[in-house]
Structures are given as C-alpha cells and as structure tokens.
Image (cartoon, grey):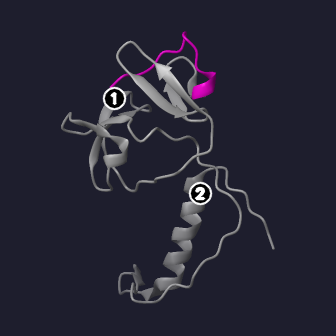
C-alpha cells in the first residue's frame, strides 16, 4: 500500500474530483469537449489514514451573511452567501458556501477576547493578521492586527 500525504485538504479533494471525472468520462464531442455520463455508477473509494482539519469554530460563533445578518456558524448551510475578505486584493467580498462540516473535536479550545466580541475556537484555527499573515489561534498576541469585517 502506498501512502500519499496531502498537505492541504484541497489537494485531496482535487484527486477525488479527478477520479470521479475519469470514471464518468465517455468521450469527446464534435468540438473536442469532454462528455461525462453522470449515470455511471462510481465505485466505492476507501481511503485509509487521517485528514488534519485545520481548526474549528465553536457552533455558536457568529457569521455575517451577505445581507449583514449574523447567525451562528452551526446554522450556515451550503448555498448561503457570507461576507468574506479577499486578502490578495485587500477588499471585502461575498462568498457562497460550498459545503459545511460538523465535527466533535477533542482538540484544545481557547477563547479570543476582543473589545466587541469573543471567539471560541480550537488552538490550531488559523487567523489572518495584517502584520504576520496566517497565525494559529494559540500563537496570536496583543500586537497582532486583524481585519475586521
């Protein structure tokens, strides 16, 4: 058995998506575009190993929807639009939720206390800071600068 380590969950998802496309591929159309048959039954893929989830929020953490309403993260569903931040272009943006996850975590939890809110998350949850980039919650300090949206 070969072990493949994926440093990011997105890479693992890309491999699975590629396998699914290859399984349903039936040929090319007149323009050379791929044709897929979604009715082809996909085999059961069994993956052994672990996937590191890079941090979790407490289920009561408030998330701001695109319309400005705030709801607990546990109420967020795929297809909803939320307020987000594009760190590459340094602007607020709206993102559509693709999928959600619910985990019972045995990781260590901490509370980050700000002047206007408290955020409960696992120690390994990463936050983007203006001065240090991505930093795990347990490594944040009072000198870190956050983008608040």
Q: CA distance from mark 1 to mark 2?
A: 26 Å
Height in image: 24 above or below 13?
below
Height in image: 126 above or below 41?
above
State the predominant SS element of the stretch in magenta.
Answer: loop
74 inside magenta stretch: no
Q: Residue at x 28, y 55 (%)?
A: 79
Q: Residue at x 54, y 62 (%)?
A: 13
> Who is closer to the viewer here, 11 or 69?
69
The disc label shown at residue 91, or none = 1
**Residue that extends furthest to the right in the rendered view of this protein:** 1
Query: In the figure, residue 29 lies in which quadrant?
Result: bottom left
Q: Which residues are magenta?
A: 136-149
Q: Which residue is mark 2?
A: 11
147 inside magenta stretch: yes
The answer to whether residue 129 shows anywhere in this view is no
Q: Residue 136, image x and y in percent?
A: 60, 30
Q: Residue 138, image x and y in percent?
A: 62, 25
Q: Secondary structure at mark 2?
A: helix
Q: Residue 74, image x and y in percent?
A: 37, 46
> Who is closer to the viewer here, 111 or 34?
111
Image quadrant in which the C terminus is located: top left
């Amino acid at each position: 058995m070969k072990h493949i380590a994926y440093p990011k969950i997105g890479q693992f998802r890309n491999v699975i998506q590629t396998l699914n496309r290859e399984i349903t591929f039936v040929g090319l159309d007149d323009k050379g575009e791929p044709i897929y048959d979604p009715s082809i039954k996909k085999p059961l893929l069994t993956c052994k190993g672990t996937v590191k989830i890079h941090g979790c929020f407490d289920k009561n953490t408030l998330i701001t929807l695109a319309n400005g309403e705030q709801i607990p993260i546990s109420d967020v569903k795929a297809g909803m639009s939320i307020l987000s931040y594009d760190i590459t272009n340094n602007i607020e943006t709206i993102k559509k939720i693709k999928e959600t996850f619910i985990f019972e975590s045995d990781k260590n939890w901490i509370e980050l206390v700000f002047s206007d809110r408290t955020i409960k998350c696992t120690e390994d949850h990463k936050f983007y800071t203006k001065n240090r980039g991505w930093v795990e919650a347990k490594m944040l300090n009072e000198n870190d600068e956050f983008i608040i949206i």
